[in-house]
Amino acid sequence: MTKIKFSSTQIILGSFLMTVLIGTVLLFLPISSNSGKPTDFLTCLFTATSSLCVTGLVVVDTATHWSLFGQTVILVLIQIGGLGVVVVVTIVSLFLGQKISFSQRTVIQEALAVQHVGGTVKLIKFILKFVLFYELMGAFLLFFHFRNDFDFLTSIWYSIFHSISAFCNAGFDLMGVKSPFSSFTSYESSILLNVTIMLLIIYGGIGFAVWEDLIKMKFDFRKYKLQSKLVIVTTFLLIIIPATYFYFFEYHMNSGVSRILPSLFQSVTTRTAGFNTTNFADMSEVGKAVSIILMLIGGSPGSTAGGMKTTTFAIVMISTMSVFKRYNEPHIFNRRIGIQIIKNAMTIFVMYINLFLLFGFIICKIDGLALTDTLFETASAIGTVGLSLGITTKLSTISRILIIILMFLGRVGGLTFIYSIIPTLNRESGYISENVAVG
């Protein structure tokens, strides 16, 4: 009998699909809902996909619709999705004392977006310690905040839930007990909650390989790998520049902390986290457009975040500037960017823009909603953000299925999906090249 061999991309895709299915079945159980009755299958599928893909878009309020069991299923899916199904399976295998084969290491390399197969097991162990430390620290700090509003046990549960959700850039919250779908709008001025959630989002969204590099090389920026340099600089700029815009043009009516905190928070959360302390529907059209751009960019490779990734955006910008300056080869930090990396970045960039626009147009026509609202929704889905202008619950069955597809593609990765279904053909075409005028 011929043994079927699956590529690393097929294994990653298949593991996500299987986990979504298991999560859907668990959420479908009567014990998962507060009413004690089964939730409709599409809602369960939507919620399971949103949880595993760490998106945060919901069609029912997490706090009021799901029971403690249902919320636990969602939290487990968030944790698995944030770390990656392959990483979680590897961690379990290590705990059971099993050896990790070379083929498994190759899959881990693909899942974590690291450059070499060597050291992947060591990286997995580092990830486990890193994640446990920061999620526990986040829960510890959040406990002091929630203790002011809830009893002891509820405060512990809320602290753990929101710490994991923030670190995994998921955006799921239990604040529906105050007002359905309200997120953290009642805590806009809480310095402790805002700063803790922002730091968890940033730590989770930078990428585990980058953190390993930072810890190993300390503060010597020159010794960092090129990927780490690009991630750090791009992340910094994508926080500061939008925050400056929000400060001067969206929250200019506020003052003091109530102006600084939301400006920083919205700049951080729009790149895949999905929490909000203010109502995005009240933003100007330009503010919504800025948010859409941030959502599409997302976090960094090998992190808990989704989106086209900070490095993709950075490479596209670097390549563009090299054309403007008429450089033969794009370069940054005294390092040349390879042509294959540029091709991959351009492909991902074009793919995300086209999917975001196409699905936004389709949903707009199907449901008769405002185009800005649907584009905001599709950007949120493919960027695995979870922010919405309030239309998620109004979407038709077809539109919800389209959002599910976008969330899945946004977390798994467009190229991973394409490579898993199209066979690899590494061969030259043999055709004669000919120049084409562009621009």
Image: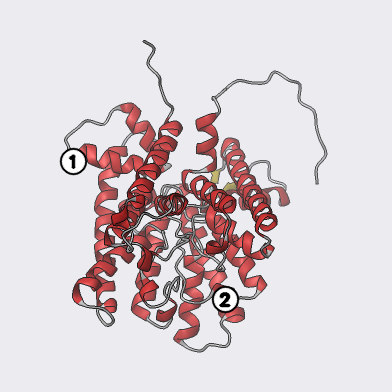
| Disc 1 from disc 2: Cα separation | 46 Å
Identify the residue shown where x is 50% and y is 61%. 271
Residue sticking out furthest to the top: 1
Foreground: 328 or 100?
A: 100
Residue 88: x percent and y percent? Answer: 30, 43
**Residue type (three-letter) at the residue carrying disc 1:** Phe
Instruction: Indicate the colouring scheme.
Output: secondary structure
Identify the secondary structure beneath mark 2: helix
Identify the secondary structure beneath mark 1: helix
Foreground: 6 or 200?
A: 6
The earlier-in-sequence mark between 1 and 2 is: 1
Foreground: 118 or 104?
A: 104
Residue 114: x percent and y percent? Answer: 41, 41
For mark 1, does the 10 Å Cα neighbourhood hold few (<14), some (14 to 19), or many (20 or more) residues? few
Question: Quadrant of residue 109 in the image?
Answer: top left
Residue sticking out furthest to the front: 37
Identify the residue shown where x is 62% and y is 52%. 356
**Residue corresponding to mark 2:** 246
For mark 2, does the 10 Å Cα neighbourhood hold few (<14), some (14 to 19), or many (20 or more) residues? many
Identify the residue shown where x is 44% and y is 27%. 7
Which circle marks residue 400 in the picture?
none
Residue 217 visible at all: no
Residue 160: x percent and y percent? Answer: 27, 64
Residue 429: x percent and y percent? Answer: 68, 20
Q: Is residue 28 above or below residue 388?
A: above
**Residue type (three-letter) at the residue carrying disc 2:** Phe
Q: Is residue 264 above or below residue 384?
A: below
Identify the residue shown where x is 33% and y is 59%. 33
Which circle marks residue 95 in the picture?
1
Give the left or right position of residue 55, taking residue 156 as reference. right
Residue 54 visible at all: yes
